[in-house]
Structures are given as C-alpha cells and as structure tokens.
Image (spheres, rainbow, N blue to C red):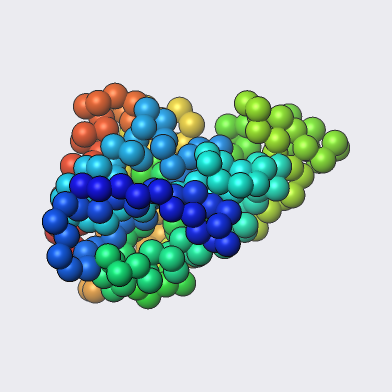
Amino acid sequence: MTTKAIRFHSNTLSAVLHKPDHQQQPSPAIIFVHGFIGSKVGEHRMFVKAANYFSNKGFVCFRFDFSGCGESEGDYKDVTVSKQIDELKSAIHYVSQMIEVDPNNIIIIGHSLGGALTALTAYQFPLIKDIILWSPVANPYTDITSITGKEAEHTAQIQGYSDYKGFLLSKSFFNDLKNHQPLKTIQSFPGSVFVVHGTSDEDIPCQHAESYIQALPETEHQKFGYSFINEADHTFSNTKWENELFNKSFDWLQTVR
C-alpha cells in the first residue's frame, strides 16, 4: 500500500489517497466522509486504519477534510451542511477522474454527520454503487443540537456564533441543518445501503440504523441491510469494535459485488 497527500477543490481541501500495492488496473474506490467537527484522521485514527484495511483488500481509498476541519483551509464558523454537500460533490468528481479508479465502482462510507451527508449526496451520482453508513445522523437538526445542547443554538441565534469545544458554530449552521432530510433523499439512491451502529452510542440513537433501512423503498434490484455492534459507542473506540466494523463493512461489499 502507498499513500499520497492531495489538495483539491481549488487547492483548498486536504486529502490522502491510499493505493493497493502492485495495482495494475483501475480499482474500486472508497471515499470516507467524516462527521461533525471531525477530520480525515478520525477518532483513534479510525479513518487512517479503515483506509489501510480496505486498501489492503484492493480498494483505492480517499479520505479528506471538509473546509474548516483538519488540514483544509477555512474556518468552522463558515461551515454549513449545504457547503459540505458541495465539497463532497467535489470529492466525488475528483476521485471519479483518477486514473487509479474504476469510475463505475465508487463506494462512500460516511460516519455520523458524514453518514447524513452521504445520504444527502450519493443519490445524485449514478456512478456510486454502494454506500455504508457508520453511526449515521438521521435528523440533522435534532441530532446535532442534542450533541451541542440547545443553549449553543440559542447563543448563535443571538450573538451570531457559539463556541463548541473550540469550534465556532454560526447561526447559519444551525438554520441550515433544518433544510436537510437524509431519510428522504436516500429514497432516491438506487444502489445498495448498509448501516452499522453501536448499541451503546450515546451521541446518535442506534435506532437510526433501522430508520434508514425502513425509509428505503422495496425493490428487487437493491440490497439493504443493517447490523449492530454490541456495546460499541459512537466512534467504535475499542479495537474489537473497530475490527468488527471494518469486517462487517467489507463482508457486505463482498455480498453486493
């Protein structure tokens, strides 16, 4: 496996590409989408380890920072979900044009708010065949304000911004959350969907796994599924849970390809 640092989206966003060793032809690709105030590294380096795991299985892996996050330019005070959707679209376009990638074989794996962003974006790209959602946000406004607390939104509405763990959240950020319904947009996604959630997630209700699958229309041409990891928390912060997460996700991809 080899890695390469990348700048894209007019050179403002930071990414890392993981390529399988001895790659001789275009390969399926996975784009990893981080969540709220996250980064392409992830808690306990989850996205680094995930990209290494999947690249060793033959996938080209692309993990990136949204603006205002990680090593990308910008400030979180300018972040909205609408802006992140545009940046995810840019990542999809970028990856689909890489010579290392089979453009008709792209998967997106989104965690937490990144799961909601995946559901809000993937249906617009026929080249995306499969999506996997890890601990996904299903109701952006309700789920995120339950994490930040209503007082954070109240402060932002009055003062323009509120501070959450060193990140400035704007009035626009909170207002924009109300405009997005991933459980609705995922109904238009024609590919396979797999959701993995920890049963002890204290940030995002594990029932969201079932909510996503129940939102999808019944069809003979699509495969849907969900799985729980017993006692796992929101970020699967235990090596056992993490390995189970990666293995379940890989096994799912094996069944739908």
Residue 177 lies left or right of residue 236; in this view the side is right
Given residues 62 and 232, the one toward you in this image is: 62
Taking the spot 67% from the left edge, 43% from the top edge, the residue there is 75
The quarter of the picture where the C terminus appears is bottom left
Quarter of the image for residue 45 reads: top left
Q: Position of residue 60 (x, y in %)?
A: 27, 56
Q: Residue furthest right?
A: 158
Q: Position of residue 94 (x, y in %)?
A: 43, 66
Residue 137 shows in this picture: no
Taking the spot 70% from the left edge, 48% from the top edge, the residue there is 78
Q: Position of residue 146 (x, y in %)?
A: 59, 34
Residue 148 lies left or right of residue 31; in this view the side is right
Q: Is residue 185 above or below residue 113?
A: below
Q: Is residue 111 above or below residue 220?
A: above
Taking the spot 49% from the left edge, 49% from the top edge, the residue there is 14
Q: Position of residue 166 (x, y in %)?
A: 65, 27
